[in-house]
Every structure is written in C-alpha cells, then in structure tokens.
Image (spheres, rainbow, N blue to C red):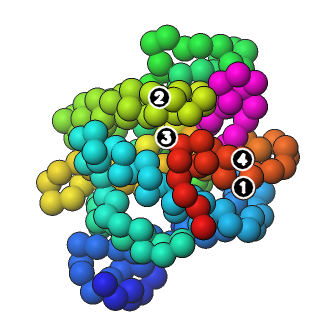
Amino acid sequence: MKKLAELYSGKAKTVYTTDDPDRMIMEFRNDTSAFDGEKVEQLERKGLVNNYFNAFVMEKLAAAGIANHFEQRLSANESLVKRLTMLPVECVVRNLAAGSLCRRLGVAEGIDLSPPVFEFFLKNDALHDPMINDSHICTFGWASAAQVADMKTLTLQVNEILGALFADAGLLLVDYKLEFGDFHGTLMLGDEFSPDGCRLWDAKTRDKLDKDRFRQGLGGVVEAYEEVAGRLGIALP
C-alpha cells in the first residue's frame, strides 16, 4: 500500500490517501489539544500509544460484530483504514456524570447514570460542537433517519462490549464519543477509540486515566494511557 497525498490533518491525527481509493493511512501524532485547540502540547509516545490502543479496541469491536474502518496497524503510529464518507455527528454515551454534563445540568461528578445518557453533537469546532437531536440531524441532512437509529443502536452496543472489557481491567468507562461514516452503503464506525476520546477511571480509586489529566493539568498523561493499555494486555514497544 503506497501512501500518497495528505487528505486531512486534525488536532491529533493526519490522514493520507493511498493508491487504493477505498483505503487511507491514518497517522497518530503526538499533538495533544484541549478546549477547541486553545491548549496544545507535544507529548512523547502519545501517537504510538493511541495507535496501538485504537487497533486493539477496533479489533475487539469487529470480533463482537461492530463493523468499523480499521484494517491493520502498519507501523508504530500509522494504521490502514477504509475510506468512509463521515457523518458530521458525534455520538456520546455517558455512564457516569463528568465534563460538560456536570457544567450544563449542575450535577455532581461521578454519579451513576442509569440508564446511560445518549447525546448527539454536531462536529463543528467553530461552533464548539453544539448538542443536537434527531430532528436537527434529519432536517439539515446530516444523516438519514435510518442512520440516526443505527448510530444509536451501535453506540449502545459498543457501550456493553467495552464497558465489560474495561471492567475486567479494573476500569470504569465513564463516557466516550464515536463517529460513523458510510462505506459503499454500509454504516461503519470510523475515527478512533483511545483515551483521547473517552473518560476512564480506576474502578477503586476513581483516579483519572484519560485526557482529563491534560485538560486539568494533572500531569502523567501518557503514563496514564500506558497504564490503561497494560491493564488491557496491549503490548507496547
């Protein structure tokens, strides 16, 4: 597979076209950002850890029947993925209260949410990713009603699969976001799943082992990511 031109460069990943129009190479960089890019730093090994982490999770999800774009890890910080037409919608599931939910609703951090809270957000940094609903999505043509229903179903299935996986490693899956896209008429999970896009707490101490360590200036960001990887049995170089 030959890497060609840069297609897109985001906050922490760069995507390249290849000589196969249906495949792309996704590069995980060491860039780390928060607050819509207002806080940015380079953290050594972060790209590598997230690449291995994402590969592990996507393979687990595929084995459980969740179709996704991941095909194989190519190097320390690059993976081969299917080229999806991404939907401009983020799907968020919250199992415990944290982050923006606490700020919006005035609820205490850490309370259990049963049933889990499901939310849609518009993927738009300029608008600070506003929360939207099914009606917005269908009216503005961001996705079809069928795609909306499938995204909800798949996102909640992922919650069951990964909630159990992390629980076995002594971790709480607090919340996470997923993005989906179309691949020749099939809705698939795209983007990534790493501690950059979810909250993970130690089940006993509730220590934060995710990107909140960066947002809140707690330090030890990559070390926390590596601890989670180790608990899951991911062999890092």
Q: Which mark is residue 163?
A: 2
Q: How many marks?
A: 4
Coordinates of residue 129 in the picture (x, y in percent): 55, 44
Q: Which mark is residue 224?
A: 4
Q: Residue visible at 29% across and 47% down?
A: 62
- Mark 3 in CB contact with mark 1 (< 8 angstroms): no
Confirm whether residue 175 shows in the render: no
Which of pointers 3 and 1 lies earlier in the amino acid sequence?
3
Instruction: Indicate the secondary structure of the residue bearing disc 4.
Output: helix
Q: Which is in the foreground here, disc 3 or disc 4? A: 4
- Disc 3 marks a residue whose amino acid type is Lys
Is 186 left or right of 102, judged from the image as shown? left
36 or 109, nearer to the observer = 109
- Disc 4 marks a residue whose amino acid type is Ala
Q: CA distance from mark 2 to mark 3?
A: 13 Å
Q: CA distance from mark 3 to mark 4?
A: 19 Å
Instruction: Indicate the secondary structure of the residue bearing disc 2.
Output: helix
Q: Residue visible at 19% across and 36% down?
A: 146
Judging by the rendered image, the residue that carries numbered circle 1 is 222
Instruction: Indicate the secondary structure of the residue bearing disc 3.
Output: strand
Q: Is residue 32 above or below residue 91?
A: below
